[in-house]
Amino acid sequence: MSIELIIPPLGESISEAVVAKWLKPVGAKVNVDDPLAELETDKVTVTLPAPSAGVLVEQLVQVGASVRVGASIGRLDPSAQPSSAAAPTAAPTAAPAPSDPKPATATPAPTAAAPVAPPATAATARPALTPNTRKLLREQGVDPSTVAAAPPVAPVRPAPAPAAIVTVAAGPEEVVPLSPLRKRIAERLVEAQHTAAILTTFNEVDMSFIQALRSKFQDEFVKKHGTKLGFMSFFVRACAEALREYPGLNAELRGDAIVYKKHYDFGIAVGSGKGLVVPVLRSVDRLSLAEIEKGIAALALKAKDNKLQLSDLAGGTFSISNGGVYGSMMSTPLLNMPQTGILGMHNIIRRPIAVGDNIEIRPMMYIALSYDHRVVDGREAVSFLVRVKDRLESPEKLLLGL
């Protein structure tokens, strides 16, 4: 009796995924928990494990197709025998020479009937370019019929693979199809802009005191905790404290009600092998600076190695994005729906500012808060950012719980 391969629940707010790759061909023998398919969501890439040992007897969904949670994408038969022909799809190669080679003029042995290639004509010799590509070539003054293309290695047939990259040798452009994951991310970003009333407010922070604190105690901190004291832990603690005073930024609009979260689970944007992801650091209000730094480092390492699980990305209540590591001076971060607030950190630049009656050169950082105006009004958002600034410029308040 065959077993259906069902898309399992993939986490909070995720209702569908894209089949990015089949990892086993039809007819292949698999063991329990062997990865069968790679699934991409807008948050993370996961694999679908085999629920039982057996043979993959059917793939119901092609690569690149969207499937909903609970849908079946294939069948596994525990009692079937593996197929000797089961192997990853590959381009056909020339047949191996027989063990007793014959002269080149020998009469070939009868073979299975195969289609005979028709004589080359203008229609068949011309590369199979898309209408858009042919239009692009004509606009550049190039005759599409003169553009060389790699000869096909196998008869063209509908395949479950994503569209291949089309490179126009005669032009300055390269057309690369969006990956399924990139498409979904684009849809989510547009959805956020169309759904929420997103506004951004800005302020600036004098980082002198935090830099001095890090310089003074960095070596001792590393020796005791085994990790560096960065800037992010100060921002996490400052935001957690400010959110207690302004809970609308740690909330969610659910239908006609506002849900105020009493826990503080922060999404921290980090780079991964497939782009920017936002894993969640739990209960940040209960963590020390060292625990925050260790937690962020562990999440960043998992993201770099593409080992994040859906549980690592679900349930965030507030987010922080640090564009400063890439040199950004100022930006307007986009909400990570359904959250109502996200803080953007930026590059630290030494510039002159007024300190009392004097002009001094100080390390300054612009910070930005994007918020959902349906839940949070301007006064609350601006006041929140002022509280964050105040705690960062007087880091002793964070250590004393003030």
Image (spheres, rainbow, N blue to C red):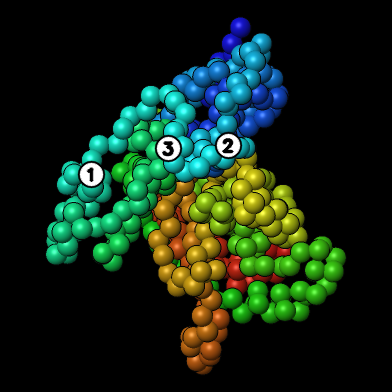
The quadrant in which the N terminus is found is top right
> Residue at left 63%, top 13%?
80
Position of 377 relative to 229 (above/below): above
Camera-nearest residue between 304 and 372: 304
Q: CA distance from mark 3 to mark 2?
A: 34 Å
Query: Which amino acid, mark 2?
Result: Pro
**Residue at which label 2 appears:** 98
Residue 108 shows up from this direction: yes
> Residue at left 55%, top 49%?
278
Query: Which amino acid, mark 1?
Result: Ala
Mark 2 neighbour density, 10 Å: few (under 14) some (14–19) many (20 or more): few
Q: Secondary structure at mark 3?
A: loop
Q: CA distance from mark 1 to mark 2?
A: 31 Å
Is residue 229 rendered to the left or right of residue 123? right
Q: Secondary structure at mark 2?
A: loop
Q: CA distance from mark 1 to mark 3?
A: 28 Å
Q: Residue furthest top?
A: 1
**Residue at which label 1 appears:** 120
N-term-proximal mark, 1 vs 2: 2
**Residue at which label 3 appears:** 161
Residue 222 pos. (x, y %): 80, 68
The quadrant in which the C terminus is found is bottom right
> Residue at left 50%, top 54%?
275
Query: Which amino acid, mark 3?
Result: Ala
Q: Secondary structure at mark 1?
A: loop
Residue 73 pos. (x, y %): 49, 22
N-term-proximal mark, 1 vs 3: 1
Position of 310 relative to 147 (above/below): above
Camera-nearest residue between 342 and 191: 191
Residue 34 pos. (x, y %): 67, 29
Nearer to us of marks 3 and 2 is 2
